[in-house]
Amino acid sequence: MHMRPPGFRPNLEPPSTQGRLPYAPGTMRRLFALVALAALLPPPVRGADLEGALNARWRGSWALIEAASASECNSFYNDNDAHGTRIDGGGAHRFAPGELAHVERIGTKRGRIDVFLDIVEQVLAARRDGPFTLYDPLHCKIQLKIPVPSSVTFEAAEAALAPLLEHFPSDALAKASSHWNRRKREPYPPDYDRTLAEYEVWKAAQLNAAVQKRMDEAIEELA
């Protein structure tokens, strides 16, 4: 009978691993380096996080639209599709590059960024009513649609916006830029106040005539 010395513990490792490390020292150093590098990198920003990050920078700010754009100048944000540094918009009112806009918000979709822009300067639209030419100041809106990869980081999204929109924290700084096109709303024609006064008189006469006509027709039907 063999006696085991005190404190003896059997070596239960399989013979193939006794006396060896599971990884070579160089491999372990490379693994530790990769783990440390991953810890230093910022997490990817996608989906709602990307939209929030973009709005934190752009929403409520001011921008110069770097390419020609267009709007119907109604109550809707009209589509303007970006193609590289070019913008295709089919609105009736066109704007030269450098148009000043206020950024209402940014929306993100899979493969696209939408920038909702309120054009700062109104446009003056002419219309005819009877013998009069009237002018209505209109507010214009643009929905700038920018294609991006389906999975995009904040930095890549900013790079897609940069050729199309120049960001400013205030309208004063935007107007100080040499890129601003300096467009102002067209002035009303001379003596337009008198034209409006004459139009109101004519409109009232047209209304009275229409009421009188309906009354005459009703009397004839009762006769």
Image (cartoon, rainbow, N blue to C red):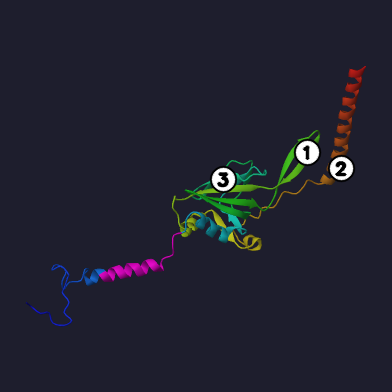
Image quadrant in which you'd find residue 25: bottom left
Q: Residue flagged by tag 1: what amino acid is it?
A: Thr
Between disc 2 and disc 3, whose residue precedes? 3
User: Residue 9: where, in percent of width, then height?
Assistant: 17, 77
Observer-side mark, 2 or 3, equals 3
Q: Residue flagged by tag 2: what amino acid is it?
A: Ala
Between disc 1 and disc 3, whose residue precedes? 3
Image quadrant in which you'd find residue 42: bottom left
Q: Give me the C-alpha separation between circle 2 and circle 3.
A: 39 Å
Between disc 1 and disc 2, whose residue precedes? 1
Q: Which of 145 and 19 is in front in this view?
A: 19
Badge 2 vs badge 3, beta-carbon distance below 8 Å:
no
| Residue ranking furthest to the front | 1
Q: Identify the disc placed on residue 80.
A: 3
| Residue ranking furthest to the left | 1
Q: Give me the C-alpha separation between circle 1 and circle 3.
A: 30 Å
Q: Identify the disc placed on residue 197.
A: 2
Give the quadrant of the C terminus: top right
Q: How crowded is mark 1: few (under 14 residues within 10 Å), some or many (20 or more)?
A: few
Q: Is residue 204 left or right of residue 111?
A: right
Q: Give the range drawn in magenta.
A: 28-44
Observer-side mark, 1 or 3, equals 3
Q: Which residue position holds label 1? A: 133
Can residue 98 be seen here? The reply is: no
